[in-house]
Each structure stands twice: as C-alpha cells, then as structure tokens.
Image (tube, rainbow, N blue to C red):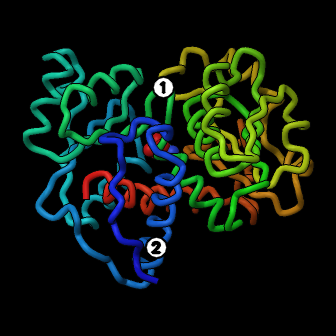
Amino acid sequence: MSQPALVAPLLSKDYLSVLDLSRTELEHVIALAAAMKRDRAAGRMGNQPLAGRHVALLFEKPSLRTRTTFMIAVRELGGDTVELPAGDAFGGREALADVARNLERWVSGVVVRTFGHARLAEFAAAAERLHVINALTDEEHPCQALADMLTLSERWGSLSSRTLTYVGDGNNVALSLAQAGVMLGLHVRVASPPGFALPASVVDACRRAAAPGASLELVADPAEAVDGADAVYTDVWTSMGQEQEASARNAAFGTYQVNEALMARARPGALFMHCLPAHRGQEVTDAVIDSPTSVVFDQAENRLHTQKALVALLMG
Ligand code: CP
C-alpha cells in the first residue's frame, strides 16, 4: 500500500500538544505513519518533502529515543538537522522570542525539549513561520502519545471500547496519553497515589476532547484500575528535573509497581507499555517488561514513523 497523499496539512502551525490536532488530523497522522512504516520496511522511502530544508533540534534535557528518531525522520524526508547547544538558545543570552525570530530565517522547524511548557508556547508564538514541535516539556509529551496510539492501532485496529490503564505519576506522558487515547475512542483509566494525579483541568479538557463513547477515569487503587484492562502503561516515578524528590516519590509509589500480580488483574494477553527509559525493578519488574505481551520496543520504533508523518504534515 502506498502512502496516503500529503494533501491535508495540519491546521496548527505547531505541535505543542495533542490538543493542537483535531481528531481527524490525529487519525491522519497515525494512518500516514503506518503507511510510511510499511513503505520503509519494503525499501520504498517515498517522496522527500523536506528536500533542501533544515530542522533544528534544541534539547535542554537528555534524550535517546526522541533525538535519534527526529534526526532519522528529517533525513528520510530529504531534509537535514542542526543540533544547537540548548544553553545558546535558552540560557538567557538573548530574549527567547529573538531566538525564535533568528531561527525562522534559517530553518523550517525546531524540535524543542525543555522544562516549562509556557516558555515553549512563548517561543512558538514569537515566529509565525517557524514550525515548533514539543519534544517533551514538564507538562506534556505529545510525540510519545502519537507512537503509543500507532502501537495500539497495530495490535487492535480500532481503539474504540478498549481499556488502557496508566499506573503511576500523573506526569507529562500520562497527560498526552490520556488526551490522545480519549480522542481516539479509548476508555482511559489513570491510577496515581494521592498528590500525583492528573490535574482536574486536564481531566476536564480530555473529557471535552473525547470521542463519543470514550472516557477518562481517575482511580486511586491500581488493582481496581487494571481490572479487565486491555493494556497497562507505566512510566518512571521520578522524571527528569525531580531527582531531589526521588526518595519521597519512591515511598509514595511503592504499591504502584507494575508486576506480574498486577498484570494478572488485566485481561489475558493484555499489553504492557512504557515510554522508556524504564527503571527496572522500580515502576516495572523485569518479568513484565520482558514478557511476550510487552510492546515497549514497538513504541520506541514507532516514535520514528509517527514523527516522520508529523514533520511531513507540518512542514512538508
Ligand atoms: N520516551 C522518550 O521520550 O525517550 P527519550 O527521553 O530517550 O527521548
């Protein structure tokens, strides 16, 4: 099957949040990514909509998956990447808006991993021709959610009436996962310890964006949340930048580990998901992450295909 035509560019200039996409656009990104994945496996690299163009990568935090997959995605679309030292751009040497206005004279887009989401929004708003992609902020991780939705689509086809349970910190990964999940028809359950749940404003926004029949439910008890689930997802208890909270978090999350006993509450054959990197023996046991139903490396692979589709549709 050949790739769907790139005839429907995204309405939003930027991709800072899953909610920047309509449901139709989200479905289109996933469908294009699936087609690009098939074509790549067959040795058909497709057209090169970024030929002669550049995309800058600006990462203030470490990254294996996101950095690597954006570099490959841009190059396979015919473009080239420029890696900038994050301190040169975000280190206070000049106004953030001026950095964006410089970059838009040289590159088509910037992939940014930073701390505060508001700074990223300010950066994106400053340059009207520069496409900005959120490669993770403290609040959201929308590129991860694209790969997660492709991974589930590959396993299940339609996501409608399936239940995805996220166990752990109501962090950036959980937020973007919940947004994308409800937009594509999933029943999403999120189990977090007191004080670490998704904020009420996020829950309200997800419910407004939900497809008919989809739902988002916050559950305190992880076993109850996993009961009958089709997939169970977790993430690290301490995210980048929270290292000083690690011991308090380890105490709070102790009963939220995804282990074989917890997975036994899910449907037989339930998928295990993790955005990686994983802290084995902490939020997930080796037996679960290495089990036959673990799809964590499919998720990692699908970062490439979904980001390639996203870049093609935003900048192609
Ligand atoms: N999942 C994820 O974003 O991985 P990296 O931090 O390695 O990019």
Check the image and name the residue furthest to the front.
Answer: 212
Residue type of the residue flagged with mark 2: Ala
Quadrant position of residue 313: bottom left
Across and down, in percent, residue 220 comes to 84, 25
Along the line of sight, which residue is nearer the eye, 185 or 86? 185
Looking at the image, residue 101 lies above or below residue 13? above
> Which-is-in-front pick, marks 2 and 1?
2
Q: Spatial distance from mark 2 to mark 1, Cα to Cα?
A: 31 Å
Q: Residue at x 46, y 73 (%)?
A: 35
Q: Going by the image, does 172 lie left or right of 267?
A: left
Secondary element at image label 2: helix
Neighbours of disc 1 within 10 Å: few (<14), some (14-19), many (20+): some
Q: Going by the image, does 24 lie left or right of 198?
A: left
Q: Residue at x 67, y 28 (%)?
A: 169
Q: Residue at x 77, y 38 (%)?
A: 189
Secondary element at image label 1: loop
Q: Residue at x 31, y 51 (%)?
A: 314
Looking at the image, residue 250 lies above or below residue 103? above
Across and down, in percent, residue 272 comes to 73, 53
**Mark 2 lies on residue:** 35
Q: Going by the image, does 27 lie left or right of 91?
A: right
**Mark 1 lies on residue:** 138
Looking at the rendered structure, which numbered label has been put on residue 75? none
Neighbours of disc 2 within 10 Å: few (<14), some (14-19), many (20+): some
Residue type of the residue flagged with mark 1: Asp
Across and down, in percent, residue 255 comes to 83, 29
